[in-house]
Amino acid sequence: MRLFHVSEESDIQIFVPRLPVRKDLDQSKGLVWAINETCLPNFLTPRDCPRVTYHCNERTTEEDKQKYLSSQSSTHVIAIEHQWFEKMKNTTLYLYEFDPTNFYLQDRGAGYYVSEVTEIPINKIVITDVFAELINRNIEVRMTDQLWDLCECIQTTSFDWSICRMGNAKKK
């Protein structure tokens, strides 16, 4: 298993556990967050870019595939708003890879893993063309005027989904 942290910062040498901001997690336990390779595309966007992402799993129905995928060859979608196209086109991302030894699963559907100890990356990958990287990974990239309708619908499907930074999304 490969685990990553995605950042726009180019020079992170060490990851120290931080207290979570999410209220549903133990606020007294610092964590280092990582994402598995399956869900990594969900984070191949600028950090503050609102997005709705979803991908097939073993329970995904044919009906959902027909309704929410544009081709049979793609099983993973990232939807962003039109206004983020230029920012995404001009963003460089850094993938910090971790040794997975100290990490444990935090959320299977979202691909989140956490470690409670300081982590030092074992590799750094630079991505200068985010769209090319997504295309190379066979990710369907969708552009839309607003994300809220898709956000509401996708949560009722059989896909694994992740919804990020919706506070930055255009209002309906």
Image (cartoon, rainbow, N blue to C red):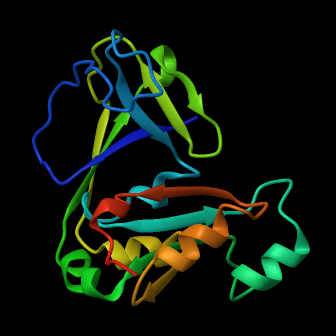
Point out the image quarter for the C terminus.
bottom left
**Residue ID at (49%, 20%):** 103
Q: In this view, does 128 lie to the left or right of 117?
A: left
Residue 83 visible in rendering? yes
- Front residue of 81/119: it is 81
Q: In this view, does 11 lie above or below 83?
A: above
Q: Is residue 90 above or below residue 48?
A: below
Q: Residue furthest right?
A: 62
Horizontal and vertical percent for residue 97? Answer: 36, 37
Q: Which residue lies furthest to the front in this view?
A: 172
Q: Residue furthest left?
A: 11
Horizontal and vertical percent for residue 10? Answer: 12, 48
Horizontal and vertical percent for residue 107? Answer: 59, 35
Q: Is residue 150 left or right of residue 100?
A: right
Res. 111 image quadrant? top right
**Residue ID at (41%, 35%):** 34
Point out the image quarter for the N terminus.
top right
- Front residue of 115/61: it is 61
**Residue ID at (25%, 75%):** 88
Res. 21 image quadrant? top left
Q: In this view, does 29 lie above or below 74?
A: above
**Residue ID at (64%, 45%):** 109
Q: Is residue 164 above or below residue 172?
A: above
Count of marks, rendered view = 0
Residue 72 visible in rendering? no
Horizontal and vertical percent for residue 60? Answer: 83, 62
